[in-house]
Image (cartoon, rainbow, N blue to C red):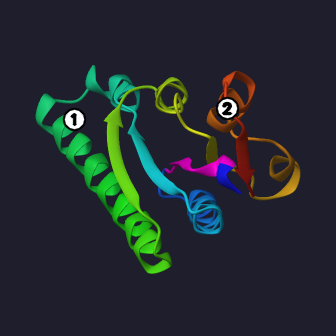
């Protein structure tokens, strides 16, 4: 199963991305591959509020988002270590889908969680996952 040597796990700290991380790590273990865990901090979330809130508050929110990213990355790193899978973690700032697609260059597969939860939404992909599926040049595994 050498076709999955380089596995990109896109995570946002959610329950679905945790399941995706576990699946990506299992795939790496089976294939003798390695994982790169990627968390994209979206500064666009802050742009909507920055017009009405002082800069100190916006910077505090940014720091909070970075702490959340570190927490998610540490969890993936610990899961990989427990499975004996080599892992690298990367935190970048930007628009999530394009950043994930850019990072996927040179990877063999991208593993990403869906965001479905209840009702009709559980049958739909999240907007980031959908953009990745539609635009990726490598296979994408969406984990529900």
In the image, residue 105 sits, relative to residue 77, either above or below, namely above
Q: Residue at x 31, y 47 (%)?
A: 65
The stretch in magenta equals 3-11
- The residue carrying pointer 2 sits among few (fewer than 14), some (14 to 19) or many (20 or more) residues within 10 Å by Cα, namely some
Q: Is residue 115 left or right of residue 105?
A: right
Locate residue 64, reporting x and y percent: 26, 51
Of residues 54 and 60, the one nearer the viewer is 60
Q: Secondary structure at mark 1?
A: helix
The quadrant of the rendering that contains the C terminus is bottom right
Q: Secondary structure at mark 2?
A: loop
Q: Is residue 104 left or right of residue 114?
A: left
In the image, residue 78 sits, relative to residue 58, either above or below, namely below
| Residue tagged 1 | 58
- Give residue 118's mark: none
Q: Is residue 144 left or right of residue 79?
A: right
Residue 5 visible at all:
yes
Q: Residue at x 44, y 51 (%)?
A: 37
| Residue tagged 2 | 138
Spatial distance from mark 2 to mark 1, Cα to Cα?
Answer: 36 Å
């Amino acid at each position: 199963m050498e076709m999955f040597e380089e596995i990109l796990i896109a995570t946002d700290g959610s329950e679905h991305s945790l399941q995706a991380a576990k699946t990506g790590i299992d795939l790496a273990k089976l294939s003798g591959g390695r994982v790169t865990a990627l968390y994209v901090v979206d500064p666009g979330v802050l742009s909507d509020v920055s017009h009405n809130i002082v800069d100190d508050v916006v910077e505090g929110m940014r720091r909070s988002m970075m702490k959340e990213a570190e927490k998610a990355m540490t969890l993936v790193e610990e899961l990989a270590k427990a499975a004996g899978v080599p892992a690298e973690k990367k935190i970048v700032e930007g628009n999530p889908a394009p950043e994930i697609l850019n990072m996927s260059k040179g990877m063999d597969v991208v593993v990403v969680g869906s965001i479905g939860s209840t009702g009709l939404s559980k049958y739909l992909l999240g907007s980031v996952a959908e953009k990745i599926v539609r635009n990726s040049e490598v296979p994408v595994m969406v984990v529900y």
